[in-house]
Amino acid sequence: MKLPPLEYACPASLSEAVALLASRGGDARAIAGGQSLMPMLAFRVVAPTLLVDLRKLPELREIKISADGVRLGAMVRWRDIEDDARLAAAHPLLKAAVEHVAHYQIRNRGTVGGSIAHADPAAEMPGICVTCDAEISVMGSNGARTIRADDFFVGALTTVLEHDEIITEITLPAWPAKRCWGFREFARRRGDFAMAAAALFYDQDANGRATNAHVGVIGLGDRPRRIPEVEAAINGQIVDEVLMERAAEITSANVEAQADIHASAEYRRSLAGTMLERALRDAATR
Ligand SMILES: Cc1cc2nc3c(=O)[nH]c(=O)nc-3n(C[C@H](O)[C@H](O)[C@H](O)COP(=O)(O)OP(=O)(O)OC[C@H]3O[C@@H](n4cnc5c(N)ncnc54)[C@H](O)[C@@H]3O)c2cc1C
């Protein structure tokens, strides 16, 4: 289907972009890589009267790595993350998860900000943000604010963003040199959205016991979620085979899952447990 008629603007400053979005009272949309928005326009899922292109805002394209963590500008593409060798040490979990995002052409255009704003429950980046306690910086006509990832996602394709707010940056807290982590995903084909995925990390105390466990699942319910029951089971323990199997059982018993044409809710819960067990096995060997 062809796109509906609409106006297009390509502002050269963030303030201008915000003003343009605000000028239409909810009838304007930012466009980043267009990989989700263009199909939605073609299928008339959304019908804005104005598109505000963010591509001429170079300040949104930077990847900054410091002692405080990794800061990704909203217009950073999947390809940029893939190509940035520094991220292998600075945030290996992010790098591993992004390898599962979409296909070559989409990875050349799709952005982290677009993914977060789109809030697909099966997308990898929102899941990494929730698992890692990311902070999302936004700018709107009422000024800048920072939102915890856990508070940002409200439901499928729904966030707390106001219509005139633009995501500017995503901050992932610093990643220590020694950390156990794992990411496992099951998709129908390589590059498809996750049917179920598990992202996790933990640190170890002097006795090799796990501390600071963060465990998230992707693709099951209406948004990515941490699983506190599994985190509690891991913390203070040596991560061995028995614990891995138990963690998988706790996951399948505690996650909320939705059925769709690809899988029943029960299958997805079971798959989540399997992904989690494998991710935990990877973590224990890293
Ligand atoms: C065939 C196919 C397969 C895919 N597979 C996967 C996959 O496996 N995993 C995955 O995670 N994704 C997948 N995607 C989606 C892809 O990763 C998109 O890049 C992503 O969802 C949106 O990014 P975008 O930059 O293209 O955003 P756009 O399509 O430009 O915008 C998406 C939404 O975000 C809003 N938006 C964009 N940028 C901002 C901003 N800075 N501030 C506020 N709002 C903003 C737009 O207004 C729009 O509502 C797939 C897409 C396709 C077409």
Image (cartoon, grey):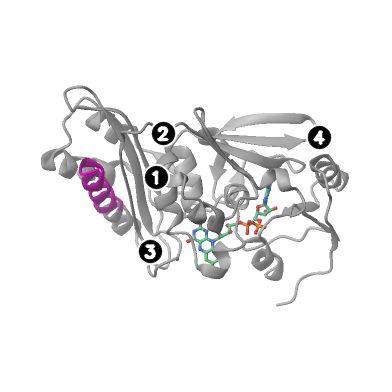
Q: Which residue is mark 4?
A: 141
- Please give the name of the residue rendered at 68% of the width and 66% of the height, measured from the top-left corner: 38
Q: Nearer the viewer, mark 3 or mark 1?
A: 1
Residue farthest along the left direction in this orientation:
242
Confirm whether the magenta stretch covers residue 273: yes
Q: Which residues are magenta?
A: 272-286
**Disc 1 packing (10 Å; few <14; some 14–19; many ≥20):** many
Q: Amino acid at mark 3?
A: Ala
- Please give the name of the residue rendered at 60% of the width and 52% of the height, measured from the top-left corner: 118
Does the numbered disc 3 mark a residue whose Cβ is under 8 Å from ligand 1?
Answer: yes
**Disc 4 packing (10 Å; few <14; some 14–19; many ≥20):** some
- Please give the name of the residue rendered at 28% of the width and 52% of the height, measured from the top-left corner: 275
- 65, 9: nearer the viewer: 65
Quadrant assignment, res 106: bottom right
**Disc 3 packing (10 Å; few <14; some 14–19; many ≥20):** some
Q: Amino acid at mark 4?
A: Ser
Q: Which residue is mark 3?
A: 187
Tell me, yes or no, whether the two marked residues, 4 and 2, touch with CB atoms within 8 Å. Answer: no
Q: Which residue is mark 2?
A: 175
Q: Which residue is mark 1?
A: 93
Q: Secondary structure at mark 4?
A: loop
Relative placement, left or right, of 35 versus 208 is right
Looking at the figure, which quarter contains the N terminus?
bottom right
